[in-house]
Amino acid sequence: MNFRGVEKTDKWGYIFTVFYNGEKFHSFDEMAGKTTVKGEFRRVMNELGFTWAKGIQQGGRTDSKVSAERNLLYVSSNFQGNLKEIIFKFNEKMKESIFIRKVEKTFPNLSFPEYIEKREYLYRYPKKRIKRSIEDIEKTLLEISGTYDVSRFTDKKGLDLKEHERTVKVTFEKNILKFIGNSFMPKQVRNMAGYILTGEIETFPGKYLTLENVYLKDELKNKIIILNTDINVSGVEKIEKTLDGEISIFYVKKENKGKVIGKNASNIKSLRKEFGNIVIREI
């Protein structure tokens, strides 16, 4: 992430942590004529005045009818209004199907999936339908946990992907299967669940599967942008900083920008000696 690139754009990146009920949607990705997670997120946010130019990137892609407790949707936008108000209105309108838990600001124009550390899925199959013994289930858990080619647990769409090797750890506690991995192929978790609970590879229903959480790499977590109220600088309206404190963002009015930078950049050089890397944004 090159912070100098931030100075050359009026956009910011926004990470939305969202819950959604997979039963309310045809699928996850946008699809013409279908009610999808991404499609409804875009439609309602755009109607409320929050727009972006490119597509929505995600922390985890979910199969049809699969729900999420916490998935991440990332967009780059030049929105400058009241985002809290937008989110409140969105949640009031969409609370039965999608709910925005929180939003975090970060660098724009990222290849977002590259900054995902791991994903966590839970499969809650009805206890009365589980016929295998705990001993057989535990043996299978050991068999399928690890780093290897998981092609046998995906579909044609997955087989067409370039990389087939995945790292996954699967546990079974209180009749719930937990899958943690760096990345998953289409239908991988549902097929693995079928294999664990029946001994045969079969695609179990999506309605019992939940994307429980998506974990960011430290590189991106450190670049979440927050308000900084600890310092005041003459001519600067608002100051933000990254969580690691390495970068400060100074928001200035157009008429004050020259004053903040100073003749021959003398003032900004002095400020950078005091506060480190500084990005100047006009408001």
Image (cartoon, grey):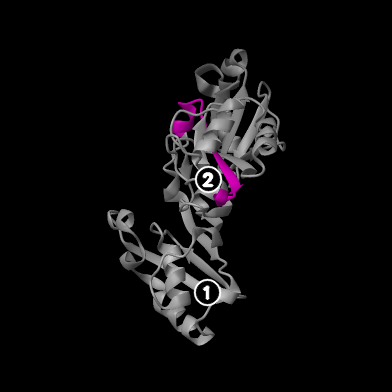
State left or right for residue 92 relative to residue 191. right
The residue at the far front in this view is: 129
* Residue 211 position within the rendered picture, expressed as x and y whole percent measured from the top left: 54, 57
- The disc placed on residue 114 is none
Instruction: Say which element carries label 1.
Output: strand
| Neighbour tally class for label 2: few under 14, some 14-19, many 20 plus, Cα within 10 Å | many
Quadrant the C terminus occupies: top right
Residue 142 picture quarter: bottom left
Amino acid type at circle 1 is: Thr
Taking the spot 49% from the left edge, 45% from the top edge, the residue there is 26
Can residue 209 be seen in the rendering of this structure?
no
Q: Of tags 1 and 2, which is closer to the observer?
A: 2
* Residue 216 position within the rendered picture, expressed as x and y whole percent measured from the top left: 52, 53
Q: Mark 2 = which residue? A: 25
Instruction: State the extent of the magenta-drawn residues as a range.
Output: 4-23
Q: Mark 1 = which residue? A: 171
> Where is 78 relative to 157, above or below?
above
State left or right for residue 35 relative to residue 260. left
Towards the viewer: 183 or 158: 158
Q: Would you say residue 15 sits in the magenta stretch? A: yes
